[in-house]
Each structure stands twice: as C-alpha cells, then as structure tokens.
Amino acid sequence: MEKPFRRRDLLGIRDLTPAEIIGILDTAENFREINAREIKKVPALRGKTIINLFFENSTRTRTSFELAAKRLSADAVNISVSTSSLTKGETLIDTALNLDAMAPDAIVVRHSSAGVPHQLAKVSKAAIINAGDGANEHPTQALLDAMTIREHKRKIKGLEVAILGDIVHSRVARSNIHLLTKLGANVRVAGPGTLVPSDFQYLVEKGLTVRSKIEDAIEGADVVMILRIQRERQDSAYFPTLGEYSIHYGLTNERLNLAKEDAIVLHPGPMNRGIEIASEVADSSRSLILDQVKYGVSVRMAVLYLATGGSMANG
Ligand code: CP
C-alpha cells in the first residue's frame, strides 16, 4: 500500500512526522535493489528535471543526488556557483527565480548559511530539497544514517545512540537528534564544552542527554556516531590544538570498547583521520562509513521521487 507524501519541499527533519520519516525510509528500501543491478536505471522520473545548486563543496551529497536523479531517469543539471552569474552580483533569490523560470521539478540546494533552502522554498515553484544549510540541518544525511542503523540493528526505537564531537557546528547532529528522538532512540551527545550548544536543553525531554565526558556517552551505546571537526565553521578557538582534541575526544578502539560489543560506528564524512577518528576504528569491521554512503543514493532516490509527486511505500 502506498501513501501520498503531502510535502513539496524537504527542508528539515524537524518538520517531519515519525510516519513521514518511516515512509521515506521504506521508499528508499524499495529503491535499494536498483543500485545493485547491472543496469541501474528505471523510468520513475523520466521527463523530470532536477537542478543541483551547491554553494559549498561536497563529494558524497552532490554525487549521490546526481546519481539518484540519473538512476530514476530524470535530467540532472549541476550548477557550478563559481561560474554562475552569482559572481557578477546577482542575488541568491534572483538566481533561484531564474532557475525556477526554466521549470525544474526540484532544486537541491546546499549553502553555508542556515535558512537558505527555506528562503528559496518561499519563491520557487520547484520542490526545494535541503542538502545542508550552515549548521542548521542536513536531512538526507540523517535519513541515510537511519537507513544504515535499521539495516544493522533492525530497529531504531530503544537504541542508545552516542553523537560525539563538534555538535555546535553540526547540521548532521541536529538532523540526527530530531530523527532519532522522533523514532524513539535515546540519544546522548558529548564533546568539548565549547562545542556542545546550551540550546539543546529543549530536546532533553524528547530523549536527549548531554554528557560532559565522551566516555560516559559511549558507555553501553549501540551506535557511536562521530562528527567531523568543522574547521571551516570555527571562527575562534574552541579547543587548544587538534592534537589535544584527538587525545581527549578522538574515537580510538580503547574508547569504542566502552560501547556494546556489537556497537556500530558511523561518520558522515569527510573524515579527519587521526583527529576525531583513529584509522583503527575507521577501517574496522564495526565501521559502516561506506555503507552510509551506499544508502545515501537510495535515500536521495526516495526523496527526489517523493518531492516530485511520488507516493510513500508503507512497510
Ligand atoms: N556527509 C556529507 O554531507 O558529505 P559531503 O560534504 O561530501 O557531501
């Protein structure tokens, strides 16, 4: 049985109901086998046009949105901001209106400022999909993380999930906290005091715990999600040196051994090896970092399909 996805845009996990999150994940499950075929193409979005508008660098998100569009037979166009008329002084909104005038069905946008996708959604006829806005949200990352967790733990409700590191600058952390608490996981966050926001207190009643030591957050965890140190978003010193960060907050085997024996490790990428994560952990059998990337294509296929009028799979 299928259910209509009643939203045009995907701006954040914060806006979604648990049923919508599960509907997207189930739809992604249905698309998953296409990515394992020899001919990885179906006609689901034939005749649709998807524009990728990335104002920030990306390897995983941009490539997987493009692959997702192409595997569903949509026409995918990548706008290179450095060669666009934005460099001649055109405003972001004017750029969006001009792209919208060419009648795309969806615009996937990444920007260093929080709220840009929300601004574009107000003026655009195309569906706007948030591919990461500043430190606000990265909804498709949280969805692919959830797909990875479901695959390996067969559930999300009741799991103990530790999210560690640079929480304050992390759109991945925000989207994951919303998603995991909506689906009934117990989420603990920990990192240097300067990198854990005080405004998270409002999430405490929804199942979030703030721990001061990362060892306390890892203890007994089913899932350990380690975040990248976002040097590009740090306009002042949040910790003395990267070396000290690694010593006090880096995920090593010794720290990971505090988690449950069958705990899994996630990292959204790109990794700073030897800083927030030791290579011995990143390359271990507990690490599902490349599975996350693999499921990213299925999740983005589902999001493009639903945002352009498709119906959600149900179970
Ligand atoms: N996880 C993630 O958003 O990676 P990219 O910056 O490479 O897209």
Image (spheres, grey):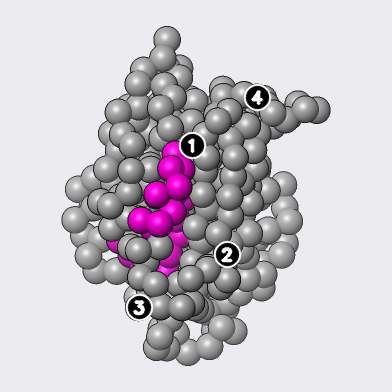
Residue at the image position 52 percent from the left and 34 percent from the top:
48
100 drawn magenta: yes
**Separation of disc 2 and disc 1 at Cα?**
20 Å
Residue on which the image places disc 3: 194
Label 1: which secondary element: helix
Q: CA separation, marks 2 and 3?
A: 35 Å
Please provide percent x and percent y for residue 177. Answer: 35, 50
Where is residue 133 drawn, in percent x and y? 39, 61
Q: Earlier in the sequence, mark 2 or mark 1?
A: 2
Q: Mark 1 or mark 3, which has the lower sequence index?
A: 3
- Tell me which numbered mark, 2 or 3, is placed earlier along the sequence: 2
Badge 1 amino acid: Leu
The residue identified by callout 2 is: 80
Q: Does the residue at mark 1 contact the one at mark 4 (Cβ under 8 Å)?
A: no
Q: CA distance from mark 2 to mark 4?
A: 27 Å
**Residue 53, x across and y down, in percent:** 49, 57
Mark 2, other Cα within 10 Å: few <14 / some 14–19 / many ≥20: few
Report the residue marked by disc 4.
42
Q: Write down the region rendered in magenta.
A: 96-115
Q: Disc 2 vs disc 1: Cβ atoms closer than 8 Å?
A: no
Q: Are marks 1 and 3 in contact (CB under 8 Å)?
A: no
Looking at the image, tell me whether mark 1 or mark 4 is earlier in sequence order.
4
Quarter of the image where the C terminus is located: top left
Question: In front: mark 2 or mark 1?
Answer: 2
Residue position for label 1: 304
Of the residues under marks 2 and 4, which one precedes in the sequence?
A: 4
Q: Which residue is pictured at 57% across the width and 64% down the height? A: 80
